[in-house]
Image (cartoon, rainbow, N blue to C red):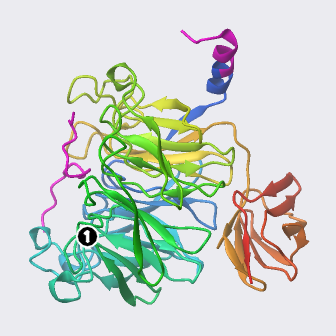
Amino acid sequence: MQQIKKAVRVGKSSWWKTACAVCVLCATMAIALQAQTFTTLVNFDGTNGDGPAYMSLVQGTDGNLYGTTEYGGANGYGTVFKVTPTGTLTTLYSFCVQTNCTDGAYPYPGLVLGTDGQFYGTTNQGGANNSSLCYDDNGCGTVFKIAPSGKLTTIYNFCARANCTDGYYPWAALIQATNGSFYGTSEVGGANDEGTVFSITSGGALTTLHSFDGTDGGDPIGALVQATGGNFYGTTASGGANEEGTVFSITSGGALTTLHTFDGTDGNEPFGALVQATNGTFYGTTELGGAHGFGTVFSITSGSTLTTLYSFCAQTNCNDGEYPTAALVQATNGKFYGTTYYGGPNTSCNDRPGSGCGTVFSITAGGIRTTLHSFGLSDGAVPFGGLVQATNGTLYGTTFSGGANDSCGSNLGCGTVFSLAVGLGPFVKTLPTSGKVGAVVKILGTNLTGATSVTFNGTPAVFNVMSSSFITTTVPAGATTGTVQVVTPGGTLSSNVSFGVEH
């Protein structure tokens, strides 16, 4: 197969669719800006990867961040990499090392850390099944697992069933549910060729839970999220009553409910995953639509009440950003953080009037949006992917293009990894985020060496410090749902979300 570097598809629509009020506020904003530190950590050069696309980095038990690039690597078909919080990059795997890319090609979506310590992901093409339904006979995509050492195992090849009724072209990252299985979506395929929702075990047993038919949505490109009640929530980029995309919920048994159908005025083409906030409400983005046609941030309740919080391109020349494709992340301060892949005041990436290189923004639950960084090509451009808050408190992300190296077949660079410190302190996160008494729990953090206490909502637990970034423990008898805390020599660290104790 011959690879041709191309722009990532961002929907059925084209890319080119169309003085402070008070001094106190100004001073507050100035202080906030001074507390922000943006750093370009990695400049991809093609050989070590090219074009990290629709993915957010994920933190491993070793404290490093892991991700994928769509292109580049030893064979040009994408990579899996790890990067330290200070920017040392290691390529773990280059796809298409096997004949005809039977190990997969173009890993758009990124990875999820499984409770077994391995990472799980998908490739959009490649694999053992070379159906005529798939682009250029390049394979229909795979599900794989990869160890932190770089050993990759393909656990499923899409289009294993006649007419690809099991789906093909997975664009979204997997999630691991509380039952231990992984859940995901395929953009197309299924019984009606409009995409699917599926579950898959770590051993590769795949079950198609739902085949979209257009009326209930189509092209599910965003990842799923499992809500506190156990059901899954997601979006489709097209379909629904207005052909503008939908928000849906689905049970583990496959019963799907359409919660909202977009009509353009409230958004169009939701690409990114939803995030369930600490208040129980879901938050997401649409790539297009809204008051100005350049995308939105919205909230939606489990009861289907949708509120448009912000419509992009509200400022002259879209200096506030345009086209948010990625999922939001809620940080430990309660704010949401996200990216737009165009817009901002820096016009080094112009391919049409007024188009900037993309932005990083924050937004409150009430819709107050602030631009935190505007890319200018040399520090990155076109951030398709979302952000992750590492346990050191810092935000990390990637750009599809830009950076210091212009060796990847375009004049926009090979992409970057960046960090953005916004003054937030360290915390701990648990894997998984819920479990029964006696269940094994991994705690990820920073500077955990010398920890003297682990508690589940105040109940002490037995634990072992495995490294400075990793503790193992079990849910103690008598524990109730609430915050997990770890006492270290440097202070007490609290979990970013409540741990749910199951009964």
Residue located at (37% from left, 43% from top): 266
The residue at which mark 1 appears reads as: 169
Which of these two is toward me, 58 or 301?
301
Residue 320: percent from the left, percent from the top? 42, 28
Residue 404: percent from the left, percent from the top? 37, 36
Residue located at (63% from left, 65% from top): 62
Which of these two is toward me, 502 or 344?
502
**Residue 21 shown in magenta:** yes
- Image side of residue 482 versus residue 4, left or right: right
Amino acid type, callout 1: Tyr
375 shown above or below 146 = above
**Total tally of numbered discs in the picture:** 1
Residue 195 appearing in the image: yes
Which of these two is toward me, 189 or 173?
189
Name which quarter of the figure residue 308 lies in: top left
Name which quarter of the figure residue 114 lies in: bottom right
Residue 183: percent from the left, percent from the top? 44, 76
- Counting other residues with Cα less than 10 Å from the Cα at mark 1, is it few (<14), some (14-19), or many (20 or more)? many
Specify start and end residues of the magenta stretch as a single range. Answer: 1-28
